[in-house]
Image: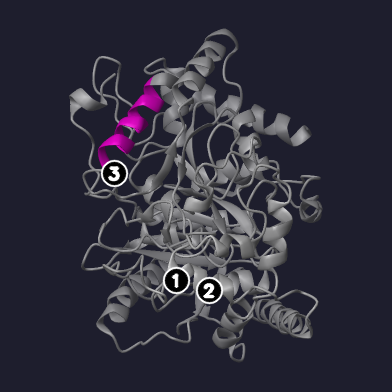
Amino acid sequence: MLRTRLLFFSFGLLMSGVAAGPHAFQSQDGPMEVVDATIDDVRAALQAKRITCRDVVSAYQRRIEAYDKSGPALNAVQTVNPSALQEAERLDRVYGALGPVGPLHCVPLVVKDQVETRDMPTSYGSVVFRAFHSGRDATVVARLRAAGAIVIAKTTMGEFASGYLGSAFGAVRNAYDPARMASGSSGGTGSSVAASFATAGIAEDTGGSTRGPAAVNNLVGLRPTVPLVSRFGMLPARPSTDTLGPIGRTVTDVALILDVIAGYDPRDPTTAESVGHVPASYTATLTADGLRGKRIGVFRTPLDPKADTTTAEYRGVRVVVDRALADLRRLGAEVVDAPDVPDIAARSAAIYDENVYETEAATNAYLAQHATAPVKTLADILLTGRVIPARARVLANVLGRSTSEPAYARLMLVREQLRREVFAAMADARLDAFAYATFDYPPPVIPADALTRTTIDSTGPGNNRRLSPAIGFPAITVPAGFTADVLPVGLELMARPFHESTLFALAYAFEQGTHHRMPPKATPPLAAGKDAR
């Protein structure tokens, strides 16, 4: 409760002196532009009475209508909230009478369709659940609404939380090149935020599903320490590594959202471990000199055993990453080679890829909470025959597996050993964080037959996202620049558990010292007549 009061007090201070950001809303006499608008932009425009909450929501809705199923057809939105304008009008009335209801008053957000919302279906990317209404809000959604945010839409996602394809929608596409993957499984959130369908969004990260879509869409994406954010009301994939995290266009926006969603929830007992680890505000470390004096260890070689360093695609990304590392030095960090941890790439990949033991029991226990669910077990889902072939094949491999198997215990021992070795390596080298490319390759082109293939590589080579979930460390990706083909590259930073404030400090200083965020050309500002109220 004290933390809530502190957040609201900080919000009041911001509102009393905030200036509109670089993408501020224009006056009511002209068009209202929301491309790349930040949370502070929305708050400042509301305070100055240049716009209403209804104006804000309407502007984002017009962009969804213009670009999601037509134009570049990003296919990033599963369901538009039919009550969003009504909620905006309610917030306008409250604002006029009492002021903002919380630190995210009238901030339109998109939420991955893995997360329950009381007023919209929750499909998990599958046609099997396309009409399923849980009738409740997940904890993160309830906290966002209490802070004044509006869930403007639910986003498309890899079916049952893997990849970028789903029987409920098809394929989600990259905002910078719609022929390419948007990464997964939170690709809909990534492309939606990049295309300014909302101010920011909620994603989920089991093995990289927040950081991947953020990296390939020129965004900031955080994978928090697992106990930090409640998973109640979210379909699980692997509970030992599942976590929800924010995606935004700026580090500040991601920090502001984490302020709202972090902390203990008795409905997810894992979050009890976060008590004592949540600061009054994650924005406290956001300073331009946040890299000064920090020591960062760089993984020079890929963390993906499948990566081929001889390809032109790898070299093209490497140029961008090397430039980003030079920027870290220029901005005051001491950049050194990461200390040697034997077989770290192969071991972290194996810890993640070989964990087939948690999914079935976790899925069945979750579905048992819902009397109206169309099916009640993972086996029943597959028996419908409606899951896309590539995803059905992978899910079939987890049937009959459980955490009571000796192999699971052995895998957890390997995980704990690697975790200890990384802790020791950081201590011995006096590191504050590690740095590496989120992906060593640009996002691949979507195959024409992707939805009918029985086997598909849903990430492409050069996926460096596995280490963070494998050892339980938080990680953030931040825009590092663009390849020669104008495809985004993400720089990932990983720190010790519950050191999100450190990650924010490093990422913010890098962001402010480089300014690599650039909106996609495929979704430009709408014509004045369309964006004006």
**Mark before the other along the chain sequence, 2 or 3:** 3
Tag 3 residue: 69
For the residue marked with disc 3, what is the amino acid? Lys
Relative height, residue 528 to residue 272 (above, below)? above
- Magenta stretch contains residue 2: no
For the residue marked with disc 2, what is the amino acid? Val
Between residue 293 and residue 67, name the one nearer to us: 67
| Magenta stretch, residue numbers | 55-67
Residue 337 percent across, percent down from the top left: 51, 82
**Mark before the other along the chain sequence, 3 or 1:** 3
Tag 1 residue: 390
Residue 345 percent across, percent down from the top left: 54, 84
**In the image, is 18 to the left or to the right of 460?**
right
Tell me how far mark 3 sits from mark 1, CA to CA.
24 Å
For the residue marked with disc 1, what is the amino acid? Ala
Main SS category, magenta section: helix
Secondary element under disc 3, as helix, strand or loop, is loop
